[in-house]
Amino acid sequence: MVKQQLTDLIFNALESARDSGAIANLVEIPTPTLEAPRSREHGDYSTNIAMVLAKPLGLSPRLVADAVIKHLPSQKLIEKAEVAGPGFINFTLNPNWLQDLLRRVAEEGDSYGTFKSSAPQQIQVEFVSANPNGPITVAHGRGGAIGDVLASLLTAVGHNVEREFYVNDALNSTQMNNFGRSVHFRYMQLLGHDMGSDDLDWLYRGDYVTDIAKKAVTQIGSSYEKLDIADPATIQKFRDIAQEGMQQEQIDDLKAFGIVFDKWFSESTLHESGAVERDIQHLTDRGFTYKLDGALWLKSTLFGDDKDRVLLRADGSPTYIAGDVAYHKAKLDRYDRVIDVWGADHGGYIARTKAAVAANGYDPERVYVLLFQLVRIMKNGELVRSSKRRGNVLELRADLVDEIGKDAARFFFLSRSSDTPLDIDMDLAREQSSKNPVYYVQYAHARCCTVIEKALAADITIPVAATTDLTVLTTEQEVDLIKKLGDWPDEVRYAADSYAPHRLTHYVRDLAGVFHTFYDAGNNEPALRVLVEDSSLRDARLVLISSVQQVLKNALGILGVSAPVRM
């Protein structure tokens, strides 16, 4: 929160300088950015806001900087503010903020870094939403990690968030029918029937099909073996068996990955309830549909789409977008804001989805689509192409989570921005060294726990931050560590506001790095060890260690990664 407090002070100073006439031409105030100066002699934080505003204001950067400093509100945070170089403003903070920060971490504990919003929204994050005819893939896993952590971030900043999986079980009937027929094929084989050659275009060949068929044999025995698969009713029976079995496998796979959805929304319910039909009529009543070549079209180009879209085919059957339009209408009736996490191959659906939302009378800005790029798995320096169970598609659980563990999988998925392609090095993910980022971070947490454990074993009472003299924490390593702890709430807010969960993995790696520097320095310089003879210094450092452990735990908790006590 220190950065946010300082940002607010600069913003207020700019407003005051404008109102006083010192920078009267200032119309719009941009959000100031803060960085740590390269040299400690230049203070704790620096901003280039004066240089950003100089050109549009027609003033020299130093003149703008002087105006900002002159109009800073009266406060206790800033000890010194001065202009440097071409117009940087350097801030030296009151040393008391370091001690106050550690006390705040101790006081807030698990809630440090979270917020209570004055205007909480009902937000839905919809992600993964894999078709119910196959297991969760590695590609789905990246979207799963992004969506799950984004939901946690939005909760952390005070919103009411629901995680939803959209089950595409109404359309693509040919695919789902073939999936049901495939389960029937394996079911009959398991009962001893000769089904002939497996060389069938429609047959799903993954081991998961046989797994579902085995469960069917266990549940229903041979009671369905005389049913005629040519009968649509039989196909529907086995389609239901196949979908139920596949959905349970998807639930189990996602749970092993650390994801539990609040709601599984079935597309078929939209059609069965008449919602799709009603929505099409609603769009027609609003004058946004027309007929052409026997089909019913949505005038989506009126709302920014590149072409109009078919809602009803000439035979009267609804298209996929018809269900999607009704689904987004249902979502916007339930939530203030909806976030869709889609693979990059769905980028072309954004304009048509927002156009449909607008045609239905909703603000399209209430819908945000977060696209994520492809992910590749590398092993022994080579690209992994084949699955253990599917052949051509890598499964999240069998091919990744079971290989490197949930923690490494989630951390690596979130190690880069969603708009950047990602390679996961399986060998690196297994390595127990500082080269492995998740091991590096978890080891920092375990080290903190070990120090606290050693103190307790030596009958040293862990001190209370509120009554401990923390002014003795003055070394470069200690101050750097406290500053990094102070960045955590700002990182949470920024990551939530910008839909950028990958920022958290960057933060915890940086925090772990600063901590390891502090800890390792103690091995070479006895004066920097934690459990020293000087009880005042020892107690202050134990408070610092406890604070690092708490923040790492909080951060890893949002990431859905475990915080081990020993490693």
Image (tube, rainbow, N blue to C red):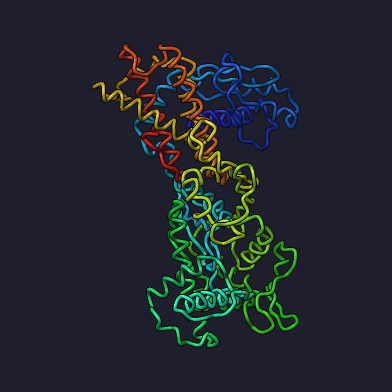
Can residue 366 be seen at all in this image of the molecule? no
Residue sitting nearer the eye, 49 or 435: 435
Q: Position of residue 543 (x, y in %)?
A: 35, 24
Residue sitting nearer the eye, 488 or 117: 488
Q: Position of residue 532 (x, y in %)?
A: 34, 14
Q: Residue at x 64, y 20 (%)?
A: 66
Q: Quadrant of residue 356?
A: bottom right
Residue sitting nearer the eye, 347 or 245: 245
Q: Residue at x 49, y 30 (%)?
A: 511
Q: Is residue 541 above or below residue 366?
A: above
The C terminus lies in which quarter of the figure? Answer: top left
Q: Is residue 106 above or below residue 337?
A: above
Q: Is residue 382 above or below residue 161?
A: above
Q: Position of residue 483 (x, y in %)?
A: 48, 25
- How many numbered marks appear? 0
Can residue 314 be seen at all in this image of the molecule? yes
Q: Is residue 386 above or below residue 223?
A: above
Q: Position of residue 136 (x, y in %)?
A: 53, 59
User: Going by the picture, which residue comes out furthest to the left?
Assistant: 459
Q: Residue at x 68, y 79 (%)?
A: 296
